[in-house]
Image (cartoon, helix red, strand yellow):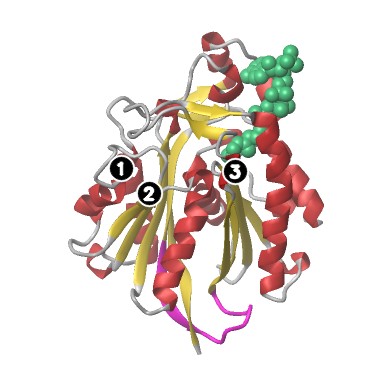
Amino acid sequence: MIVRSVILGVGAYLPANIVSNAELSKRVDTTDEWITERTGIKQRHVAAEGQFTSHLAIEAGRAAMEMAGIKSSELDLLIVATTTPDNTFPATAAKVQAVIGRPGIPAFDIQAVCSGFVYSLAVADNFIKTSQVKTALVIGAETLSRFLDWTDRSSCVLFGDGAGAVVLQAAEGQGTSADRGVLSTHLHSDGRYADILYADGGVSSTQTTGLLRMKGKEVFRHAVVNLADTAREAVEANGVTFADVDWLVPHQANSRILDSTAEKLGLSADKVIVTVDKHANTSAASIPLALHQGVTDGRIKRGQLLLMETMGGGFTWGSALVRF
Ligand code: UT7
């Protein structure tokens, strides 16, 4: 018998305000045609004034706890993956904890940009596997709209705000790929690429938060290679094949990246959960938002095998194989 981290509940929250490509084209020199053709994005949600990352995270966390049927008194660990925290400190997780968490449990943020959710899932899974905690709330939440250069059309059209969450709980498994729960996680980083996707500010360097900067073409080139590699290591580590994977639940950056990765892996497009058209790139929130979409529309069913993969600033990248 081994301990597995089973996803008991999934939650999501998207701000009410939706901004279409057509609306964006009034603000920057772009068109719906360009954005759709190059990225697949049609719209994005944008947080209201006074609505912070923690507010989005709280709503998504609550929804995940409700689906899981657990109360905050049962939580042992709270992690928020975010690059857009409410404050430099305390951690956004602490602010979430004050509203929906249990006082006294560890609560902290993980900063791995678009890979933040997979990083957080891995950390929570390891806490659970080593029996340090039984139940964890893992949230990916972002207000990227606050962090964009609205004069840079090559980046500002790509991102959106939102939050997604999962409740993980320890359960006994046999140690095979038939177990429910997180089967394995695989994390990578290569800081040599830090200047390809980054914020041009920070507490220590400029005493400002800076704005998102990206060399899109270079990120794209690395993304298609790294995503396919980490997806392969996840299936190989578990002795399964891509034919056994029911759903690819990828980070949502660009539909061309999704298509190209699926093709490389021999997965048909109808096995890929796509939300980039409606949410744009929500960084650490994008995988749990996609998971939530697939679960609530009935495509993702209990017992199915899910492959999550992601790539973001750092560069960071990684994957998780999960039996839902
Ligand atoms: O979450 C992980 C991080 N992000 C990613 O994974 C993103 C990866 N990269 C991408 O998705 C793509 O590289 C982009 C969508 C960012 C850009 O697509 P691209 O096909 O690589 O376009 P490009 O940067 O080569 O630009 C092509 C042209 C340029 O014009 P010229 O030089 O050919 O005249 C740009 O100035 O498109 C122009 N352009 C735009 N035109 C209209 C750039 N942005 C826009 C825009 N609207 N918003």
Q: Nearer the viewer, residue 105 or 247?
A: 105
Closer to the chain start, of discs 1 and 3, is 1
The quarter holding residue 267 reads: bottom right
Please state which amino acid type lies under the numbered disc 1: Ser
Q: Is residue 175 magenta?
A: yes
Whether the residue under disc 3 has CB within 8 Å of ligand 1 = no
53 relative to 236, above or below: above
Please state which amino acid type lies under the numbered disc 3: Arg
Residue 169 visible? no
Q: Nearer the viewer, residue 141 or 122?
A: 122
Residue under label 2, please give it: 60
Residue under label 1, please give it: 54
Magenta segment range? 167-180
* Residue 285, position as x, y percentages in the image: 47, 45
Residue visible at 44% across and 80% down in the picture: 171
Closer to the chain start, of discs 1 and 2, is 1
